[in-house]
Image (cartoon, rainbow, N blue to C red):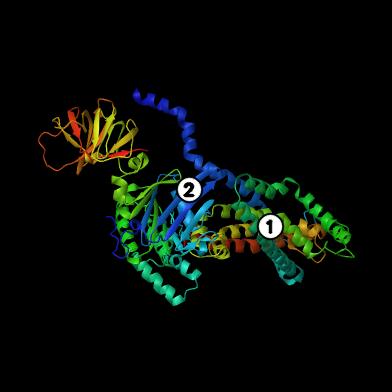
Amino acid sequence: MSETAQQDRVRPWRLADWFVRHGRTLVIGLPMLWLVIFFLAPFFVVFKISVSELAIARPPYLPLTSWEDGKLILTLNLGNFQYLIEDSLYVSSYLTSIRIAFFSTIFALLLGYPMAYVIARSTGHRRNLLLMLVMLPFWTSFLLRVYAWIGILKANGVINNFLMWTGVIDSPIVMMQTDFATYVGIVYTYLPFMILPLYANLAKLDTTLLEASSDLGARPLTTFLTITLPLSIPGIVAGSMLVFIPAIGEFVVPTLLGGPDTLMIGRVLWSEFFNNRDWPVASAVAMAMLVLLVLPVMWLRRAQSQQEAG
Amino acid sequence: MTSKPSPAHDYPWQSDSAKPFIRIRDVTKKFGPVAAVDNVSLDIYKGELFCLLGGSGSGKSTLLRMLAGFEEPTAGSIEIDGQDMAHVPAYERPTNMMFQSYALFPHMSVERNVAYGLHRDNVAKGEIRQRVSDMLELVQLSGYERRKPNQLSGGQRQRVALARALIKRPKLLLLDEPLGALDKKLREETQFELVIIQETLGVTFIVVTHDQEEAMTLSTRIGVMNNGKIEQVGEPREIYEFPGNRFVADFIGSVNMFEGVVTENEADFVRIRSKDADCDIYVSHGVGCAPNQKLWYALRPEKMEISRERPDQKENFFEGNVEDIAYMGNQSAYRIRLKSGKIVRLTRTNRDRGEETPITWDETVFVSWGPSAGVVLIA
C-alpha cells in the first residue's frame, strides 16, 4: 500500500521535476534557437547566394543544384570572390573602410578616454549626470542626428556662418562630402560605445594603487602611464572593438556626409545590391567583410584570454 | 617583547633636549563638518616604532594618510625631519607606506613591484637589481621574483608590500594595519620579523592598528586615539598600568571600573567609598582630587586575589558569588557577582596542577587587592 501511496504523492511533482532536469537546456536552448533562426540561417542564405551565378531572373541568381540525366549537379560559382580580388574597386574600398574605421577608433579613443576617466573619478550625482549625457543622444533617431550634422557642417551651416560672421574666414570652408565629415560622423556616432566600456573599467580601478604609486615617488603622469593605462587595456580593447567593427560596415554616415571618393564597403555593397542588382557579388562582398572582421576579433579574444590566464 | 631601544637612542621622549623627528602640531582634518582628526599634537623620535591605536573611525588612518601626503590637514602643521610638509606632494615626501590592502600592482611581477620606487628615482639598472634581490632576501622571498601578486599567499603578499615600501630606504615608514589580513599564527611570527627588520634598518615606523595586543608587542610607544583626539601617549607598560582616563583603561586590556566618591583626601593616601564595589577603597598615594569628588577606580582582573576566607583587612575587599568560570589552561577567568549586582572579572594563574578543591560555581568568595593595585581616574 505504502508504495502506491508514495507514487501518488510524487506524481504532481513530475512536471516540476522535468523542468528542474531540463531547465538548463531550456535556458541555453532558447537563445541558441534564436541565433540559429535569425543569424545562422540568413548567414547560410547569404553564403549560398555568394557562390551562385548571376541571372536575369527573379530572384536574380541561378539555383545551386540542378537535375540532369538522373544526375544531381551542384554548381559552386567562386567567380564572385575571384572578381572581388581582380577588380581594384573592392580592394580599395575595403582598404578605405579599414583606414577610416581605424582612425575613427583612434580619434574616439583619444576623445573618449579622458571623458571616461573624468566620469569614473567623479562621484554621486555628478557621475550619474555625466553618464546620462553620454547616453542622451541614443534617445533621438540616429538618422536624425546625422542630418543634424549636415546642418552644422554645410557651406551655409552653423560653423561656416559663425566663422564668417566673426570674420575669421571670407568664404565658407568645404566640410561636407569630405573624409573629414565622415570621420566626424563616425566618431560622433560611436563615441558612447568607446566611453561606456572604458568607464566600466576605470571605475573599478583600485585608487589605493594610484596612492601607492605616488607614495613610491611617481608623478601623476608617470602613475597614469605605468598603472592606470596598463590596467585599463581590457577597457580600451573592448571599446575599440565596439567602435571599429560597426565603423567598418558603416553605410549611413559615409553616404550622407562623405564625398563621392569616400568609397566604404557598406556603400559598395548597397550599390551592388540595389543599383547593379548583382546579388551574388554583393553577397560575396558581405562574406569577405565577415571574414575580415571575424578573424581579428577571434585573434584579439584569444590574446585577451591568454593575458587573463597569465 | 618591547623592542629594546639601542643605546644610541635610549628613550628620547623622556629627555627634554631630544629633537623630535616628526612634529605634528595642532593638526585638524575635517571631512565636511566632521573632524576626523581633531587638534592633534604629537612628537615622534628617530628610530621609534610608534603605534597609533584606536577603534574604527578614531582618526588613526586619517592621521597616517596626512603624514603620507594623501590628505591635506585642514589646519595645523606636520614637520618631518625639520622640513615642513605643507604643500609637499606624496611623491616628494621622504616617507613610504605599506597599505592595509597591500595595494600591489596586479600587472607587475614581484620583482617589478619592489623595483617600482627605484625606477621612479632613475637608479642605475645594476644597482636596482642588487637592491631588489637584497630586499627580497631580507623578507625571505628570494625565488619569487617572477610571480604575479595573484600567485602569492596572503603572507607572501604582505612581505612584498613591506619590501616595496622599504626599498627606497625611507626616513619614515607608515604601516596601515600591516598584519590585519593575516591569520593569528602568521601574525605573531610576522610581528617579530617586523621588529627585527625595524631594528636592523633603523627606520622610524609608525604603525596604525586596532589590535591592542599587536600595539603592545610591537611598539616603543603607543598613542591611543578616540574620536579624532589622542587620549594618551606612552610606553606600552605606562599605558597599561597607568591609563590616563576611563577610555584608555577600558580600551587597553580588560578592566573592572568602580564609580566612587572621595571620603578622605590626604597627601599620601585617599579613601574612596564605592557603592559599585560594596566597600571602601584605600589608595596608598595622593591623588589630585577634592573631598566628595566623583571618580573611578580601575582594577585589572589579574591584580586581585580570590579566596574562600574573609581577608584580614578593613578595605579593598568584597564578597561575591562565582557566576562563571572559564578554564583557559594557563589561567582561569572568574566572573563574580557582587551584592550591588556588578559583575567583576578576575583572572588567576593556574599555578598548581591537580588542585584538590578548586573554587567552583555558585560559591561565595572574597576578592581582595593591595592598596596600589588599581588606578584612580578622574576623567
Question: What's the chain of the residue with tag 2?
Answer: B
Front residue of A125 and B274:
B274
Q: For residue A14, which numbered disc appears in the image?
A: none
Front residue of B218 and A104:
B218
Position of residue B323 measured from the top left corner of the image (x, y, whole percent): 23, 29
Quadrant hosting residue A50: bottom right
**Type of the residue with mark 2:** Asn
| Nearest to viewer (mark 2 / mark 1) | 2
Position of residue A292 measured from the top left corner of the image (x, y, whole percent): 65, 64
Q: Is residue B258 left or right of residue A188?
A: left
Front residue of A263 and B344:
B344
Question: What's the chain of the residue with tag 1?
Answer: A
- Could you tell me which residue is drawn at 60 percent across and 57 percent down? A238
User: What residue did someone put label 1 on?
Assistant: A246
Q: Is residue A274 left or right of residue B229?
A: right
User: What residue did someone put label 2 on?
Assistant: B39
User: Is there a contact, CB below 8 Å, between mark 2 and mark 1?
Assistant: no
Quadrant hosting residue A198: bottom right
Q: Residues within 10 Å of mark 1 (few under 14, many from 20)?
A: some
- Could you tell me which residue is drawn at 81 percent across and 60 percent down? A276
Q: As drawn, which residue projects farthest toward the right? A: A170
**Type of the residue with mark 1:** Pro
Q: Element under label 2?
A: strand
Front residue of B257 and A145:
B257
Q: Residues within 10 Å of mark 2 (few under 14, many from 20)?
A: some
